Each structure stands twice: as C-alpha cells, then as structure tokens.
Amino acid sequence: MSAIDKRKLRHTRLRKKLTGTPARPRLAVHFSGRHITAQVIDDSIGKTLVSVHTTEPEIRAKANAHANVAIATEVGKLIAQRGSAQKISQVVFDRGGFKYHGKVKALADAARDGGFQF
C-alpha cells in the first residue's frame, strides 16, 4: 500500500468522527508538494467560512519557497486572523490524514497562537 493510500485511509477514519458545527467549525488542512490550503468549514450547511491558500499575495510576498514549515506557520497565523475577524474562536482540527508532525504541527501551533482553540 502506497503512502498516499495510507493517508487516504487515515483521512477516511478521521472524517467519520469529525464534523464541523456552527459553534465549532472544522479547520481542514491540505498539503501538496508546492502549496498549503487551510479552510474553516461548517459541515452542517456545507459552506467554507474562511480559507487561506499559499497562492494568495499576502503569503507570496512573505516567502517564495515551496510548502515548508515557515510557510505553514504563516498560513496558520493568517487563518486564525481571518477566523477571528469572522468571530470564530473554537474549531475542530482536521489534519486530513497527514501525520501531526512538521508542517501540520507548525500550522496548528500558529493557529493556536493566533487565537483558535482546538
């Protein structure tokens, strides 16, 4: 079984247990080789409330590198800042099947420092 298939299995197991509510929306993250995406999602209405992607000018101006820990930290700070503007303080963290290490941990820690409570 390939690493991608293992990640998809982990993600399927996680999604059975995690759902975002209006009180605690889901903070979902996705990592590719080049980009990082973070979204705050209310699963009860199926709507993305806040999103951040590494192709946005605010992040591109700070770093031109590929997806790494420094950029994950910037994405975490920005998603927390935008969430606070929408009066979102508590979220459920959906790591998307990725192991809680490296970029995932950096993004989560930055979001916590920015004001999100997991």
Image (spheres, rainbow, N blue to C red):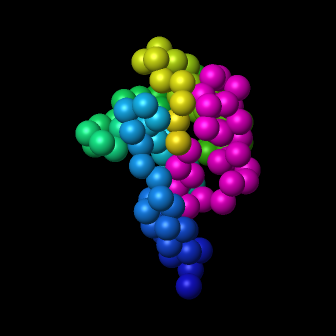
Q: Is 40 left or right of 58, judged from the image as shown?
A: left
Q: Which quadrant would residue 60 be assigned to in this image?
A: top right
Q: Which quadrant would residue 118 be assigned to in this image?
A: top right
Q: Which quadrant would residue 105 be assigned to in this image?
A: top right
Q: Position of residue 38 (x, y in %)?
A: 49, 39
Report the magenta residues as a range. 93-118
Q: Position of residue 51 (x, y in %)?
A: 43, 32
As rendered, which of 40 and 32 lies closer to the eye? 40
Give above or below for 74 relative to 33: above
Residue 40 highlighted magenta (yes or no): no
Identify the image quadrant of the N terminus: bottom right
Residue shown at 66% from the left, 60% from the top: 99
As rendered, which of 39 and 66 lies closer to the eye? 39
Residue 14, can we see it? yes
Outermost top residue: 85
Q: Position of residue 84 (x, y in %)?
A: 52, 18
Residue 4, can we see it? no
Residue 114 highlighted magenta (yes or no): yes
